């Protein structure tokens, strides 16, 4: 019996080593040029928001940078990755709910356990322009929780981090996340 347990342990260890090898190979492929994603935002019906969001793989996380214009002066807007890159509906609802592959609760972007899509808020200046720059430790361009082909959603109201999804209301801009040529 003891030998059986030992054999099982050895087998598990071999499996772990094999899996870490696979992860290593994956990172190498990232270095060959598949390290960037981009999302061009489209205003939903009755809104005038435009902008771009980029995701760049870096050591220690994914750098998320957004430039958005056409927002109300000095306003705050929930900013999320939603499940679908489908931006066909005029109200933006076709992007579905928050991208949440691990089944966690809604949370702030710096939380360890959160929806992958929980990016917090965009904050517009007096001219209605917002910029966002954060190194994110949860978002993945490649891998199990890849954000490729998912959607970005900007909401009319702030994300106040209440359950289940922050209470940020209607959708004023949406976009689909696609692979970009790495620089
Ligand atoms: Cu949202
Ligand atoms: Zn969420």
Image (cartoon, rainbow, N blue to C red):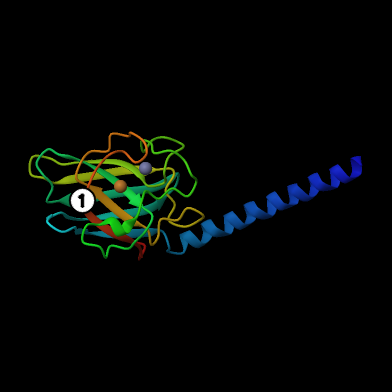
- Is 9 left, or right, of 89 in this rendering? right
| Residue 145 in the image: above or below residue 60 | below
- Mark 1 vs ligand 1: CB below 8 Å: no
Q: Is residue 19 above or below residue 179?
A: above
Which quadrant of the rendered structure holds the C terminus? bottom left
**Residue 125 occupies quadrant:** top left
Q: Residue at x 47, y 60 (%)?
A: 31
Quadrant hosting residue 138? top left
Using the image as rendered, state which of residue 36 and residue 99 is in the foreground.
99
Q: Quadrant of the N terminus?
A: top right
Residue 101 spot, x, y in % from top left: 47, 50
Bin the neighbour count of mark 1 within 10 Å (Cα to Cα): few under 14, some 14-19, many 20 and up: some
Residue at 44% of width from left, 52% of height from top?
140
Secondary structure, mark 1, is strand
Q: Position of residue 52 (x, y in %)?
A: 23, 56
Please give the count of numbered marks on the rendered protein. Answer: 1
Q: Position of residue 70 (x, y in %)?
A: 11, 51
174 sits left or right of 114 in the view: left
Q: Left or right of 152: which side holds 34? A: right
Give residue 9's position: percent from left, percent from top: 79, 44
Q: What residue would you read off at disc 1? A: 67
């Amino acid at each position: 019996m003891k030998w059986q347990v030992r054999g099982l342990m050895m087998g598990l260890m071999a499996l772990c080593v094999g899996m870490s090898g696979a992860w290593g190979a994956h990172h190498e492929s990232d270095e060959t040029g598949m390290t960037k994603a981009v999302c061009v935002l489209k205003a939903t019906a009755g809104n005038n928001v435009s902008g771009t969001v980029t995701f760049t793989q870096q050591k220690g996380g994914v750098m998320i940078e957004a430039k958005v214009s056409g927002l109300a002066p000095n306003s705050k807007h929930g900013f999320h990755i939603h499940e679908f890159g489908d931006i066909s509906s005029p109200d933006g609802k076709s992007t579905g709910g928050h991208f949440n592959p691990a089944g966690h609760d809604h949370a702030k972007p710096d939380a360890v356990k959160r929806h992958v899509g929980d990016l917090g808020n965009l904050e517009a200046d007096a001219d209605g322009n917002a910029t966002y720059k954060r190194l994110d430790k949860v978002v993945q361009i490649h891998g199990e929780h890849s954000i490729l082909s998912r959607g970005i959603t900007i909401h009319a109201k702030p994300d106040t981090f209440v359950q289940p999804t922050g209470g940020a209301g209607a959708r004023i801009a949406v976009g689909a996340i696609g692979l970009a040529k790495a620089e």
